[in-house]
Image (spheres, rainbow, N blue to C red):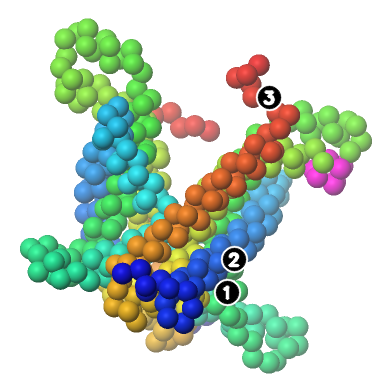
């Protein structure tokens, strides 16, 4: 029963593992893009300009109210032409085709960005106002205020939330399989189709996802501990 | 923008709304029963009950919905025993596989919401109810349940929206609901932006209506909005 998972050309073991690697890669790059978008749009939501706040509000509302699958279809069918359109403005007339990895990262990154925006906004809001005021009184601004004083505090508060976003992102990457990117989901479909053993391969896929979840929980727990160093909770005082 | 195409496809995509709503409402209602059962198992204090419930929730929350759907639709049908069982007329239909998967998924997620709600009920109320001579079932129905509903409603509203979004996945197993029709039109006309706008707006309207109803219910039940 398990020889279908043999490594090498006789079994699907190595292909499935490569699929897991691909899932982790595309999830990580999506999360990175998502956090970047999250920082930008959280800044927009917290800004004093109505236009910026409105743009960020529209972005998060649309992403959180529309199925992920539709967003992926939009980029899958429209991504390449959008990029070519942009390239034309800059004078490049050639044909550009985005690969499935890029499309997947942009789509899932945009989704994860909307959730990160809320997490980061909440974290920035929970930094006491006094911290900003004291920083400014000390004559700090720009990087020294936001990079050195505010960011470490935001990071600590946002970390559990980002852990949840990672969880969502990881599961959303399964949807990219419809665009042909060979990650866990797609790989188990291919293997199930060619061996006529769907049950065993979908079970294997379930185990792989749970394994990745477990490992990332361990990672986020230790990161939380690291960032909480030197911080005494209010309950402990 | 091809507005004419948007206008035409709007009427085609609208035809998928009944199927989306049907699947969402059937699985939400079935899911509530599952969720209450799982939540009660988890807080039962009996490890034989709480452990399976814990692992069930862990399994469902840790795996993508699409994989669960494939597992039910393709994975189970591999076995002769299932194909010959009385369940086969149900399990061979993508419609029912979609409903089963969505029910299990929302059951797991909502069980956590309900569990949180039940745990938030103060012990004092339960003790007071016992002192007044109410039976356990009466205590649950008259005291625990109403408070749980109030506690859980805001989070449950989110779960409803997630369900509407999740129902789009059943288009992958050939069901022609909103996303399924949208995808067909996109691959025929190659106008992804236009169709996305049409289908996306329909989803936004559905979700907006749900939010309105949940807000209304919250106000009825006197739930203070956290600001």
Q: Tag 1: Cα neighbours inside 10 Å, few (<14), some, or many (≥20)?
A: many
Q: Is residue A170 above or below residue A143?
A: below
Q: CA distance from mark 3 to mark 1?
A: 42 Å
Q: Main secondary structure of the magenta part?
A: helix
Let me know if residue B130 is in the magenta part. no
Q: Nearer the viewer, mark 2 or mark 1?
A: 2
Q: Earlier in the sequence, mark 2 or mark 3?
A: 2
Task: Indicate the quadrant containing the C terminus of chain A: top left, top right, bottom left or bottom right.
Answer: top right
| B207 sits to left or right of B75 | right
Identify the magenta region. A141-147
Badge 3 marks a residue whose secondary structure is loop
Residue B142 x/y as whole percent: 21, 22
Tell me if residue B70 can be seen: no
| A76 sits to left or right of B19 | right
Q: Quick one: B61 or B83, which is closer to the camera?
A: B83
Badge 1 marks a residue whose secondary structure is helix
Chain letter belonging to callout 2: A
Q: Quick one: A82 or A178, which is closer to the camera?
A: A178
Q: Earlier in the sequence, mark 2 or mark 1?
A: 2
Chain letter belonging to callout 1: A
In the picture of the structure, the residue carrying the numbered disc 2 is A25
Residue B184 x/y as whole percent: 36, 80
In the picture of the structure, the residue carrying the numbered disc 1 is A101
Q: Is residue A11 above or below residue B71?
A: below
Let me know if residue A144 is in the magenta part. yes
Badge 2 marks a residue whose secondary structure is helix
Task: Indicate the quadrant containing the N terminus of chain A: top left, top right, bottom left or bottom right.
Answer: bottom left
Checking the image for residue A24, the label placed there is none
Q: Earlier in the sequence, mark 3 or mark 1?
A: 1
């Amino acid at each position: 029963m398990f020889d279908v998972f043999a490594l090498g050309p006789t079994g699907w073991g190595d292909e499935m593992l490569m699929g897991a690697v691909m899932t982790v890669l595309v999830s990580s790059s999506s999360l990175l893009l998502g956090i970047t978008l999250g920082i930008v749009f959280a800044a927009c939501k917290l800004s004093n300009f109505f236009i910026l706040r409105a743009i960020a509000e529209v972005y998060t509302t649309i992403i959180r109210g529309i199925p992920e699958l539709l967003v992926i279809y939009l980029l899958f069918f429209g991504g390449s032409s959008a990029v070519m359109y942009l390239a034309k403005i800059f004078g490049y007339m050639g044909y550009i085709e985005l690969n499935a990895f890029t499309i997947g990262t942009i789509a899932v990154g945009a989704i994860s960005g909307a959730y990160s925006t809320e997490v980061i906004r909440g974290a920035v809001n929970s930094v006491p106002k006094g911290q900003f005021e004291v920083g400014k009184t000390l004559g700090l601004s720009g990087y020294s205020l936001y990079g050195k004083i505010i960011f470490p505090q935001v990071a600590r508060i946002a970390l559990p939330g980002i852990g949840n976003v990672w969880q969502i992102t990881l599961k959303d990457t399964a949807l990219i399989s419809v665009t042909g990117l060979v990650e866990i989901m797609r790989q188990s479909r291919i293997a199930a189709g060619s061996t006529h053993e769907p049950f065993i391969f979908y079970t294997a896929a379930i185990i792989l996802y749970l394994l990745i979840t477990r490992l990332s929980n361990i990672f986020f727990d230790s990161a939380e501990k690291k960032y909480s160093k030197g911080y005494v909770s209010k309950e402990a005082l | 923008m091809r507005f004419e195409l948007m206008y035409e496809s709007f009427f085609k995509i609208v035809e998928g709304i009944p199927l989306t709503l049907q699947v969402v409402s059937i699985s939400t209602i079935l899911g509530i029963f599952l969720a209450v059962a799982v939540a009660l198992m988890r807080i039962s204090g009996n490890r034989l009950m709480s452990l399976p419930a814990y692992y069930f929730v862990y399994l469902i929350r840790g795996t993508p919905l699409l994989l669960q759907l494939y597992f039910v639709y393709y994975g189970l049908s591999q076995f002769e025993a299932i194909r010959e069982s009385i369940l086969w007329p149900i399990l061979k239909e993508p419609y029912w596989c979609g409903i089963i998967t969505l029910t299990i998924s929302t059951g797991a997620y909502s069980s956590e919401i309900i569990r949180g709600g039940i745990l938030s009920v103060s012990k004092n109320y339960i003790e007071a109810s016992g002192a007044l001579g109410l039976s356990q079932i009466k205590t649950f129905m008259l005291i625990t349940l109403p408070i749980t509903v109030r506690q859980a409603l805001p989070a449950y509203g989110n779960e409803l929206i997630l369900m509407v979004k999740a129902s789009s996945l059943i288009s992958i197993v050939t069901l022609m609901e909103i996303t399924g029709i949208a995808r067909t039109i996109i691959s025929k006309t190659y106008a992804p932006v236009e169709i996305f706008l049409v289908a996306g707006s329909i989803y936004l309207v559905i979700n907006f209506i749900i939010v309105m109803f949940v807000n209304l219910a919250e106000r009825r039940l006197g739930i203070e909005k956290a600001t």
